[in-house]
Image (spheres, rainbow, N blue to C red):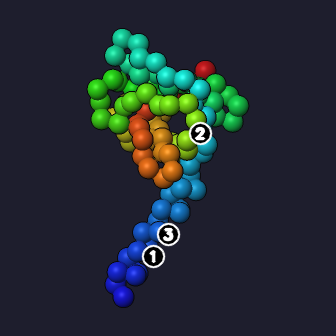
């Protein structure tokens, strides 16, 4: 019985957290001077995601559609607007959001 309650609570928490996510379309990635830059679109607006190559959670993303979550201020590893990128509910990277 406890297992069923815990599983239901975890499912509910996942659904609540997923509501804060927005779709993001990755259009390309490159590495420039040890900085990974991911080119993307959010609501039709061009943005860049940046992270330091070699850091945990930093990788070039393949083109495609992902979801992103903007982290609260002072959360994350970068001194900027930090986001986490997900694909099929799996965390694939942590980045700094650079809006153009």
Any mark on residue 22, and which? none
Mark 3 packing: few (<14 Cα in 10 Å), some, or many (20+)? Answer: few
Tell me if 25 is positioned left or right of 70 in this view: right
Q: CB atoms at circles 1 and 3 under 8 Å apart?
A: yes
Mark 1 packing: few (<14 Cα in 10 Å), some, or many (20+)? Answer: few
Marks 2/1: CA distance?
Answer: 28 Å
Quarter of the figure with the C terminus: top right
> Would you say residue 52 is visible in this rendering?
yes
Quarter of the figure with the N terminus: bottom left
Marks 2/3: CA distance?
Answer: 24 Å
Query: Considering only order in the chain, which callout, 1 or 2, is on the residue closer to the N terminus?
Result: 1
| x and y, in percent, of residue 44 in the image | 70, 31
Find disc 1 in the rendering and name its residue: 8
Q: Nearer the viewer, residue 83 or 38?
A: 38
Find disc 2 in the rendering and name its residue: 65
| x and y, in percent, of residue 45 in the image | 67, 28
Question: Dot 3 lies on which element?
Answer: helix
Residue pictured at 64% horizontal, 25% vertical: 46
**Nearer to us: label 2 or label 3:** 2
Mark 2 packing: few (<14 Cα in 10 Å), some, or many (20+)? Answer: some
Question: Dot 1 lies on which element?
Answer: helix
Marks 1/3: CA distance?
Answer: 6 Å
The tally of labels here is: 3
Question: Dot 2 lies on which element?
Answer: strand
Query: Considering only order in the chain, which callout, 3 or 2, is on the residue closer to the N terminus?
Result: 3
Residue pictured at 50% horizontal, 45% vertical: 87
Find disc 3 in the rendering and name its residue: 12
| x and y, in percent, of residue 20 in the image | 56, 52
User: Measured along the vertical axis of the image, is residue 51 above or below residue 72?
Assistant: above
């Amino acid at each position: 019985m406890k297992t069923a309650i815990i599983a239901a609570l975890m499912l509910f928490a996942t659904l609540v957290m997923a509501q804060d996510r927005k779709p993001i379309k990755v259009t390309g990635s490159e590495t420039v001077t040890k900085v990974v830059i991911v080119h993307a679109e959010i609501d039709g607006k061009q943005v860049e995601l940046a992270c330091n190559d070699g850091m945990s959670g930093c990788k070039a993303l393949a083109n495609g559609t992902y979801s992103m979550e903007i982290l609260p201020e002072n959360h994350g590893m970068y001194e900027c607007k930090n986001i986490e990128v997900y694909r099929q509910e799996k965390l694939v990277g942590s980045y700094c959001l650079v809006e153009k």
